[in-house]
Image (cartoon, helix red, strand yellow):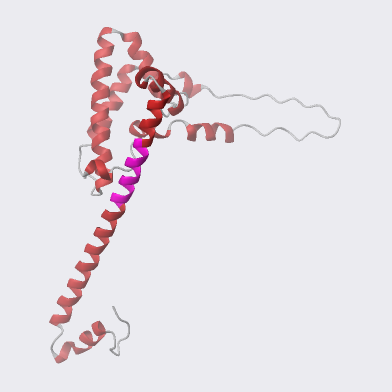
Amino acid sequence: MLKDLMNPLNLPAGALCVLIGPRAAVDRAVSNRPSPPVRQQGELTTMSVTIDTTEAEEVQTPEQLLVELSELHMRTHVSPLPKHPAAMGWQMTTGAVAAGFARALHALREVAPEKAAEIAEWYQGPFGDGPDPEEHTDWTAQRVAKSWDVVEQWAQEARKLAVQAKEATERHEQERQAAEVATLRAQVEAVRAFATSHEYRWLHELLDGYGTHGGHL
């Protein structure tokens, strides 16, 4: 059931990086570029652009990434857990992926520290908010799928699952709303049954919708 209800939600940055990539960071970088000065007719102007590379120079180490993955895994298992099935499904999946990544990175660091450092730097991404989705898709086509036809097939299957998840989430919301309405009606009927004496007749009339106290349910 959880698999059918999985739908992208607001996950921690470590889990969401492979879904959204650095697009938001690219937009920020473009918006932060200085505007060129207004040039009068016949006037030559020059403009120098300074790019802040402070964050890019702070390369994440395998040890730091292991701590981040461990914290992410712990976050997915502590209470309170989400009540929505879609959020719960994605949170459990995120925890499993974080655990597997941490184990693999730790094993790689033991036998090939330089490769572990490369993975940590790649995971950090060019803008510090995760790997580039397009670059990783190219890598997947070359190293895993071995064919763009297979990648397209996986994409089609993913779209079908996304539609199924959307439909399952909508059904869950409808069932939840129907349950809330049923609970409210039961509470109103309980109050109506209590308001049987003359002393509470005004409340009975109010619940029926024609009392002098106005309003109706």
Seen from the viewer's position, the closer of residues 142 and 196 is 142
Percent x, y for residue 75? Answer: 25, 35
Q: Quadrant of residue 50?
A: top right
Q: Residue at x 23, y 49 (%)?
A: 83
Position of residue 35 relative to residue 103, above or below, is below
* Segment tinted magenta in the rendering: 157-169
Residue 29: percent from left, percent from top? 55, 31
Q: Please report the residue visible at 41 percent of the width from the left and 26 percent of the height from the top.
A: 149
Point 24% across, 32% down: residue:
95
In the rendered view, tell whether residue 217 sits above or below residue 165: below
Work out whether 146 lies above or below 40: above
Position in image of residue 201 (x %, y %): 19, 89
Most distant residue in the right direction: 42
Q: Examine the rendering and report whether any part of residue 8 can be seen.
A: no
Say which of 95 and 153 sits in front.
Answer: 153
Residue 167 on the magenta span: yes
Please name the predominant secondary structure of the magenta segment in the image.
Answer: helix
Q: Where in the figure is residue 55, as x and y percent of width and height?
A: 47, 24
- For the N terminus, the image quarter is top left
Is 190 placed above or below 149 here?
Answer: below
The answer to whether one can see residue 4 in this image is yes
